[in-house]
Image (spheres, helix red, strand yellow):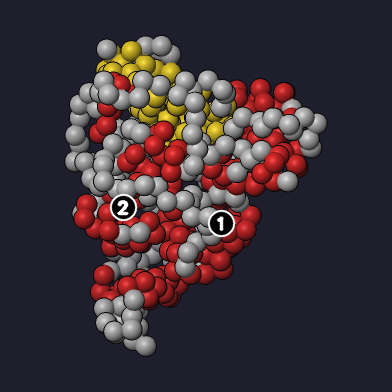
Amino acid sequence: MSRDPHHHDHDHSELSETELRVRALESILTQKGYVDPAALDLLIETYETKVGPRNGARVVARAWSDPGYRARLLADATLAIAELGYLGRQGEHIVALENTPRCHHMVVCTLCSCYPWPVLGLPPVWYKSAPYRSRVVADPRGVLRDFGVELPTGTEIRVWDSTAEIRYLVVPMRPAGTEGWSEERLAALVTRDSMIGTGLARTPAEVA
Amino acid sequence: MNGAQDMGGMHGFGPVAPEPDEPVFHAEWERRAFALTLAMAMPGGWNIDMSRFARESLPPGEYLARSYYEIWLAGLERLMAERGLVSAAEIAAGAPQGAAKPVARVLSRSDVLQVLHRGGPTERPATAPARFEAGDRVRARNMHPATHTRLPRYVRGHVGTVERLHGCHVFPDTNALGKGESPQWLYTVCFAGTELWGADADPAVRVSVDAWDSYLEPA
């Protein structure tokens, strides 16, 4: 197989051309001494296995369980989230938004893909995609229907476009029938989408 | 800049398509492109606003045709080429051509977790009181800089209400150009859906952006 990314074989998909280009780039950057491949491995491992929406689910479950924590989270989410050890890149300034029966929050970055990495990990493809970024600021109810979510018409929808370095975490409403549940059980109800605002927390029946 | 990245309110992209059980990456090259982009910021010496400007500078047709990590890759190649770190000819050849340019620092494996934990806070000490307070009516300026800005087109010229103050933050419009951080007060400004999209819009929708002081004027 040619290493020339401009070489076209009939059995080459466009994807494999990109793959070759990235391999070539990594090889050049390593030979030039600009990157340490072991550092690349650790960056990937961190975001693939360590940092993800499980973190955010723990934050939400604690807020549901502990009124003091909830108050701290709503007052200064960056500090409250750091209490659980989640902080840093793309979560330097976090604001928590609590959903209520009257107001449902949704988060987007229309200009790129800003997303609270320490609590949700890297964003899913749909969050970065043109359909979501173009439409959620103008037709959030229509976007919710794409996710199978229908809210009462009286519920206000509040869309937050992350145009600066403030990152937003939605605290979904705690489902009924979860009184007395442990934080661990509650966390299993908290989906990634419910912390972006394109979904609701699971009900006990949905996880039974 | 009024590029393809500024998508709020555009029509025709179709429904949102969530992927069940979506993996973090969809191909090995996405993993490497992601990590290369993060790692190269240190030797490359660029900031996040320069990275965003490089990505959105793709011609609109290309921006819309490329996948997310393809856009990152194109942005990375542009940033490196601008600084003489890697040329298009080297990428085409798949090998370095000539000596490496000296760089200040390289991201080592032992630094990774500390660098991620530290992140890049953008809040800076305020040197003057805020011009607006919560509840103030403000108009997003009608401005169309050809360079990087974070004021999306769909709010320009529209009147909203200051909802939150976030302190002073690095100003992306100058930071993207290497003209300094020039921190400004940052506000969450909230607009009625009907103000942005007209009388037919859902009356129970409100949309906010985070706007720096110079994006706003009293209304």
Image quadrant in which you'd find residue A158 = top left
Return the mark for residue B55. Answer: 2
Q: Amino acid at mark 1?
A: Asp
**Looking at the picture, does residue B40 appear above or below residue A95?**
below
Picture quarter with the C terminus of chain B: top left
Q: Position of residue B119 (x, y in %)?
A: 52, 45
In this picture, residue A52 sits left or right of residue B156: right
Sequence order check: which comes first, mark 1 or mark 2?
Answer: 1
Q: Are marks 1 and 2 on the same chain?
A: yes
- What residue is drawn where x is 27% and y is 31%? B154
Answer few, some or many: residues within 10 Å of disc 2's Cα (few below 14, many 20 plus, some between 14 and 19): many
> Which type of secondary structure does the marked residue at label 2 adopt?
helix
Residue beneath disc 1: B21
Identify the subunit bearing mark 1: B
Mark 2 chain:
B
Query: In the depicted view, which residue is nearer to us: A130 or B11?
Result: B11
Q: Does residue A53 appear to the left or right of A90 in the view shown? A: right
Q: Nearer the viewer, residue A28 or B17?
A: B17
For disc 1, the neighbor class at 10 Å (few under 14, some 14 to 19, many from 20) is few
The percent position of residue A7, horizontal first and vertical second, equals: 27, 82
- Place residue B108 in its image quadrant: bottom right
The picture places residue B17, in percent across and down from the top left corner, at 42, 51
Q: Nearer the viewer, residue A98 or A138?
A: A138
**Three-letter residue code for mark 2:** Arg
Q: Position of residue A6 (x, y in %)?
A: 26, 78
At numbered mark 1, what does the secondary structure look like: helix, strand or loop? loop
Name which residue lies at 36% across and 71% down.
A15
Q: Residue at x 39, y 53 (%)?
A: B45
Q: Would residue B171 be visible to someone looking at this image? A: no
